[in-house]
Image (spheres, rainbow, N blue to C red):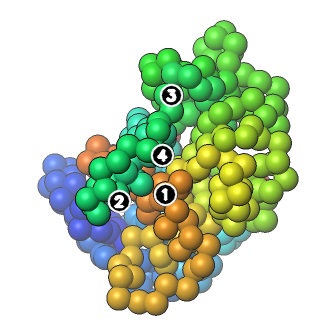
Amino acid sequence: MKLIDFGVREDEKKYIEEWSKENNIEVKIVSDLLTPETVQLAKGYDGIVAYQQLPYDEKIFDTMNEYGIHVLSLRNVGVDNVPFAALKKNQIRLTNVPSYSPEAIAEYSVTGLMALLRNLKHMIRKVDQHDFQWAPDIGRELNQLTVGVAGTGRIGRAAIKIYQGFGAKVIAYDKFHNPELEKEGLYVDDLDTLLKESDVVTLHIPSLGKGNTLINSKSISEMKDNAIVINTARGDLINTKDLYDAVASGKLYGAVLDVYEKEVGVFNSDLSDQEFSDEVLDKVIKSPRFILTPHIAFYTTKAVKNMATVSLNAMVSELKTGTSENEIDLGK
């Protein structure tokens, strides 16, 4: 068995190499993304593992079929950038890593919130300028707030435990209720209720599809004054301009953003020597009421190792048995 792994970062290499040695399976590591050009490197291999934020071109799967490769294993959760129709046409199975570390993302959402509640971004900037005055950066306490958790999958449930540990009141919404949370009486009937009743809204749901935002001028108008938004899920859940305007006007207190609707080509890139043309993102960066990070909520040693190894294990299962517990249902 020979595998090829595309889009591999430096921090992933050692885990892939360790897995390859432990399992006695050859894995070719490629730093380039999987494209119609680079897929040619896969000729002679049995399966392809990959990770990228850019869309996967349909031509990739025509070539895979030509090479007799019928499994693509993703090192990430999201599959919205993969054209299912092209996979089905070429009889290619798809797997992902559904849970590499829910706790990493949940912990990060709370970390960002605490930084915002205690005005750390602004205070650190002041101290850097030798301004050691307290006012006007008085903080707020999480134990005094109602946190609305939108989405109660693995990450949402991990976040709930942490918020409850701080003493916050937690409410939640999900189309599919978790039995244990149901017993606790945490669920509200709809997202509108969650937005109206929460001091903090933290998003742990998948994309709603192109053009469909959850946080926008209309929904913001229904939210509590001085509320906070946290997004470690998908950038396109939020209209960032509307969010910025709401914070700038004083309607909302602030936001923690680890994702952004225009992050591809920006996040995880060094643009320090380039002219920055995204006015909205630039305003967010400069505002003391925004905590912005480049999609790093997942970025821990545990999560990176799981992304590298779980994807490879799923690939081996697919090649040996024709299926795996992480196989994606491509539909009819």
Return the residue at label 2. Answer: 125
What's the amino acid at mark 3?
Leu
Q: Residue at x 56, y 34 (%)?
A: 156
Secondary structure under the numbered disc 1 in the rendered image: loop
Q: Nearer the viewer, residue 69 or 36?
A: 36
Residue in the picture at 42% in, 50% down: 297
Q: What residue did someone put label 4 on?
A: 136
Cα–Cα gap, marks 3 and 4: 19 Å
Q: Is residue 321 left or right of residue 4?
A: right
The answer to which of marks 1 and 3 sits earlier in the sequence is 3
Residue wearing tag 1 = 288
Quadrant of the rendered image containing residue 226: top right
Quadrant of the frame with the N terminus: bottom left
- Label 3 with label 4: CB-CB less than 8 Å: no
**Residue at far top of view:** 183
Q: Nearer the viewer, mark 3 or mark 4?
A: 4
Q: Which residue is mark 3?
A: 142
Q: Is residue 162 above or below residue 50?
A: above
Taking depth in this image into account, of 212 and 110 the one nearest to the observer is: 110
Residue 32 in view in this figure = no
Check disc 1 and give the amino acid type.
Answer: Pro
Q: Is residue 60 left or right of residue 218?
A: left
Q: CA distance from mark 2 to mark 3?
A: 23 Å
Counting residues from the N terminus, which is met first, the one under dot 2 or under dot 3?
Answer: 2
Q: CA distance from mark 1 to mark 4?
A: 12 Å
* Label 1 with label 2: CB-CB less than 8 Å: yes
Could one spot residue 269 in this view of the protein? yes
Q: CA distance from mark 1 to mark 3?
A: 19 Å
Instruction: List x then y, in percent, for residue 271.
Output: 39, 82
Q: Which marked residue is nearer to the observer: mark 1 or mark 3?
A: 1
